[in-house]
Amino acid sequence: MSLKTTLAALALVAAGGFGLWSMSSSDGSQTLIPVGAALAQDAGATQNTAPAADAPAIEIKDMTLGPVDAKVTLIEYASYTCPHCANFHANVFKDLKRDYIDTGKIHFIYREVYFDRYGLWASMVARCGGEMKYFGVQDLLYSNVQEWAGSDDPNVVVENLKKIGRTAGMTDAQLDACMQDGAKAQAMVDHFEASMQEYDVQGTPTLVVNGTKHSNMTYADLKALIDAELAK
């Protein structure tokens, strides 16, 4: 199944179509289904979508928590518009953070997945405040997903996301600059496509524990996996 998406179909705040839709499956994951869609100018325009020829490449880093030399590395692939990811964040991640991340037992890597333009915009806002604010903004995005993403009007969604950014201490000028940075949006899409291919990820949430891929699971099951790795 192809996971290819383009900036024209997904990244632009000005684009009306979706590059990818999603479908829930029985195991509690969100499956990627590529779909083509027409574009419509229905939100604030993003300009300069491609960097100048002499511009330096934009590096997109995964957001991480915990010591890089921990015995266990856990990668989470997730989307801000995936309800199963929001459920994982509310019911699994909080315990995972308390028991394993905050105690320095694991290195946690969060990799963004973009099912649709709303998810990409949310990630742009989360990254706008830098690494120090990222996971705090993430909490706001997941805990309020029904509120900020619940409109069919992209203008409303953009304003809802800006409200979350303001709550996290960002200014309108900062948020406008972040959400209108088409070159960075393209770099984020490129990074997303490459990171999905690394473990042939087809849905979210997907968890990778010390290089082994797993689908969505309860905290008890994830704890058992981590403890087994720590015991080796």
Image (cartoon, grey):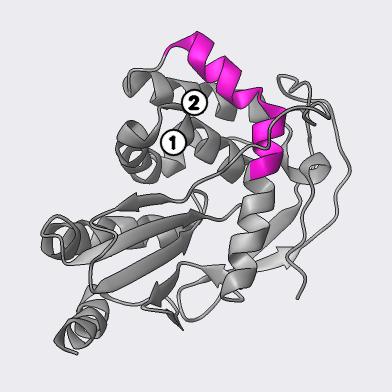
Q: Which residue is denoted by mark 1 in the rendering?
A: 147
Residue shown at 74% from the left, 23% from the top: 46
Residue shown at 34% from the left, 69% from the top: 74
In the rendered image, residue 29, in percent from the top left (x then y), is placed at: 50, 72
Residue shown at 41% from the left, 64% from the top: 76
Q: In the image shown, does 177 or 152 lie closer to the viewer? A: 177
Quarter of the picture containing the N terminus is bottom right
Q: Are marks 2 and 1 in contact (CB under 8 Å)?
A: yes
Image height of 95 relative to 178, above or below: below
Looking at the rendering, which quadrant does residue 203 occupy? bottom right
Tell me, yes or no, whether the highlighted magenta stretch contains residue 134.
no
Image height of 21 relative to 105, above or below: above
The type of residue carrying mark 1 is Glu
Q: Secondary structure at mark 2?
A: helix
**Magenta region: which residues?**
171-187
Q: Which residue is denoted by mark 2 in the rendering?
A: 160
Image height of 208 relative to 160, above or below: below
Looking at the image, can residue 116 be seen? no
Looking at the rendering, which quadrant does residue 101 occupy? bottom left
The type of residue carrying mark 2 is Asn
